[in-house]
Image (cartoon, helix red, strand yellow):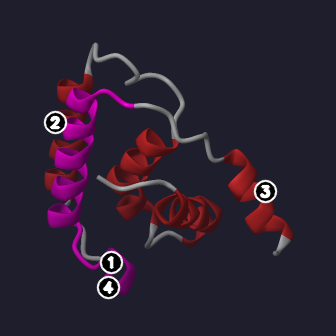
Amino acid sequence: MHVLAALLLALIPPVTPIPVELELCMLKAEICADDAAPDTGMCGVVDEDALQGCIAGYEDCSYGLPGASDPSCQIERTWCALEAPFWVADDSNADTVKYCLEVAETCPAY
């Protein structure tokens, strides 16, 4: 394993129990992000306004829910789904994109 990959994996928070209400918010956010930025890895087409709407929707949905502010692998996955499409086209964010790819492979999806 490469050193960078090992470091990235060390930074990923653990999988933690998530309340069902928060799981639903996370699922809706990830679906919304996928609709706003389909095939981002291929062509970098992002509907930035729609993606910002996904972020706002997730924040509204998860606000005040238990576990929403706790570090967890699942929440990190959701934030990567929401934010990584903005970073893919910018080479200065390559390490962050790699981190989010590792999160997507490591953390459970809903």
The amino acid type of the residue labelled 2 equals Gly
The residues tagged by marks 4 and 2 sit, at their Cα atoms, a distance apart of: 25 Å
The secondary structure type at the circle numbered 4 is helix
Q: Residue at x 20, y 28 (%)?
A: 21
Bin the neighbour count of mark 4 within 10 Å (Cα to Cα): few under 14, some 14-19, many 20 and up. Answer: few
Of 81 and 88, the residue lying toward us: 81
Residue type indicated by callout 3: Leu
The residue identified by callout 4 is 43
In the rendered structure, the answer to whether residue 76 lies left or right of residue 66 reads right
**Residue 37 covered by magenta stretch:** yes
User: Which segment is the magenta one?
Assistant: 18-43
Q: Earlier in the sequence, mark 3 or mark 1?
A: 3
Position of residue 47 measured from the top left corner of the image (x, y, whole percent): 18, 63
Q: Closer to the observer: label 3 or label 1?
A: 3
Q: Which residue is mark 1?
A: 44
Give the alpha-carbon distance from disc 3 to disc 2, as whole Å: 31 Å
Foreground of the two, 88 or 101: 101
Q: Which residue is mark 2?
A: 57
Separation of residues labelled 1 and 2 (CA atoms): 22 Å
Distance from disc 4 to disc 3, alpha carbons, whole Å, reads: 28 Å
Asked whether, in this view, residue 94 is left or right of residue 16, the answer is right
Q: Nearer the viewer, mark 4 or mark 2?
A: 2
First reached walking from the N terminus: tag 1 or tag 2: 1
Q: Are marks 1 and 4 in contact (CB under 8 Å)?
A: yes
Q: Earlier in the sequence, mark 3 or mark 2?
A: 3
Amino acid at dot 1 = Gly
Residue 7 badge: 3
